[in-house]
Amino acid sequence: MTLTPHDDLVLLVRDPIAADTLIHHVRQADDGAVVTFDGCVRNQSHGRKTLYLEYEAYESMALEKMKEIATSLHTLFAIDGVAIAHRLGRLEIGETSVFISVSAPHRKAAFEACRHAIDTLKKTVPIWKKEYFEDGAVWADGELPPVPAATPAAKPAS
Amino acid sequence: MTLTPHDDLVLLVRDPIAADTLIHHVRQADDGAVVTFDGCVRNQSHGRKTLYLEYEAYESMALEKMKEIATSLHTLFAIDGVAIAHRLGRLEIGETSVFISVSAPHRKAAFEACRHAIDTLKKTVPIWKKEYFEDGAVWADGELPPVPAATPAAKPAS
Amino acid sequence: MQTRVLFFGKLKELVGAEQSVELRSGATIAELFERFANQKPELASFRSSVVASRNQEFAPWTTVLEPGDEVAFLPPVSGG
Amino acid sequence: MQTRVLFFGKLKELVGAEQSVELRSGATIAELFERFANQKPELASFRSSVVASRNQEFAPWTTVLEPGDEVAFLPPVSGG
């Protein structure tokens, strides 16, 4: 568990995510809106019946990237509080793998920030999902995170 | 409590809204995303300190309009389940006045449908909020719902 | 004919929550509102910021009422 | 110099989770990956669908490594 300068909550957990605790953390007296995203394990993937999933992470870097997302939300949107939790290890069908909660004085910012958070998490946080089917297991297709361009000093002379 | 043809849940309640029950109702095994909107009572309105709120509704019509919103979400977005609850009576600062939960196989539809639901509710559902301040009470500014045009038979001949 | 009329929000504080009135056959919602505005002149000032419903559906002012209709006059809504 | 190298996802299944390697001073991330690809030829086929990090930050292949760096090779991420 990590708190950012904005008092945001960022977590990687191996037990079920405590949604109530996260929502309670972001709610403040001057907030009129809390938007939450709950990503849960589907019973199928591309038409194949899923038995369960396993998530693994590069934990130290994943926490850093999740903190970066939380911090960037305060710059991009008029929001108050952010909580982001991702679960690791084995997850059964219907269980929550990722939970994001954003509070704001007004609903537009809360919706936009929550959406931005999950979209960014799926592109930049080093977490991997392995899908277990009746006839084997595969690593899920994912997204290649954007990498900063090489600094001029590191480029070959032209 | 009312169930629509899609098994959606639509409620007007006088006790605190049971968010868990609503979320549980919309989650199904083929859903990957649940987006919720929690509208809560702010401690101020246009810079004046709010003491508490009172909500009243034209209950039979409000339930009809909430059902219409839930039904329209299934037409407009690729979603699975909807739950919409609004609380009536006296509400204290920080309490939830409205709670909307939408489940979908994919997150885009869940976000868009949840946003559409609250935007539409605020424009079309006959519910009124009275704000109590230290020096008096006022009915909150609201939105005038759109009314269908008069049918030709009802128009004066031109 | 007998018509049930409901008022909400600030209109309710002015006119009362519920009334039953006797209307001529073929009367419109506009006519019904007029009837109350004649009794309570302050009500007339709300005319442009009120919508009407008939039987729980928003309805234009020109709607001709039927016996047994339930009409409501609704100020701008502020739920959420 | 000594460099700690981590692999994740399908790369981990191929190479192992963690290794410590001795590199020449001034070596790049690309050179480090090459070293493993020479030992495990299948790894080379992943080159275009892998990104690297240095000290928990995404880093281009041309990054010159410093003593004590922690490098990781990351397949496409699929959290959420």
Image: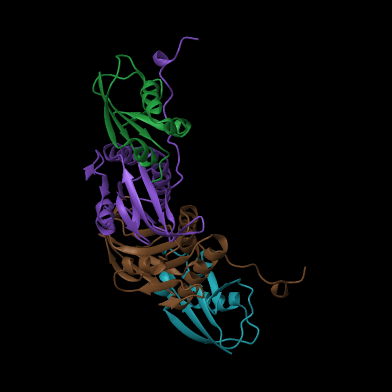
Chain colours: A brown, B purple, C green, D cyan
Instruction: Give coordinates of residue A87: x percent, y percent.
Output: 35, 69
Instruction: Using the image, determine if residue A53 lies above or below residue B39.
Output: below
Of residues A61 and D67, the one nearer the viewer is A61
| Screen quadrant of the C terminus of chain A | bottom right
Residue B104 visible to an observer of this rendering:
no
Instruction: Using the image, determine if residue B129 lies above or below residue C71.
Output: below
Residue B155 visible to an observer of this rendering:
yes
Instruction: Give coordinates of residue B71: x percent, y percent.
Output: 32, 38
Instruction: Give coordinates of residue C34: x percent, y percent.
Output: 40, 24
| Screen quadrant of the N terminus of chain A | bottom left
Q: Which residue occupies the extreme right position in the image?
A: A158
Q: Which residue occupies the extreme top position in the image?
A: B157
Instruction: Using the image, determine if residue A104 lies above or below residue B63.
Output: below
Say which residue appears at 29% left-offset and 19% top-offset.
C23
Of residues A137 and A100, the one nearer the viewer is A100
Q: Is residue A100 left or right of residue D37?
A: left
Of residues D18 and D70, the one nearer the viewer is D70
Instruction: Give coordinates of residue B132: x percent, y percent.
Output: 40, 55
Instruction: Using the image, determine if residue D18 lies above or below residue D51.
Output: below
Say which residue appears at 40% left-offset and 18% top-offset.
B151
Of residues A87 and A139, the one nearer the viewer is A87
Q: Is residue C30 left or right of residue D44?
A: left
Q: Which residue occupies the extreme bottom position in the image?
A: D1
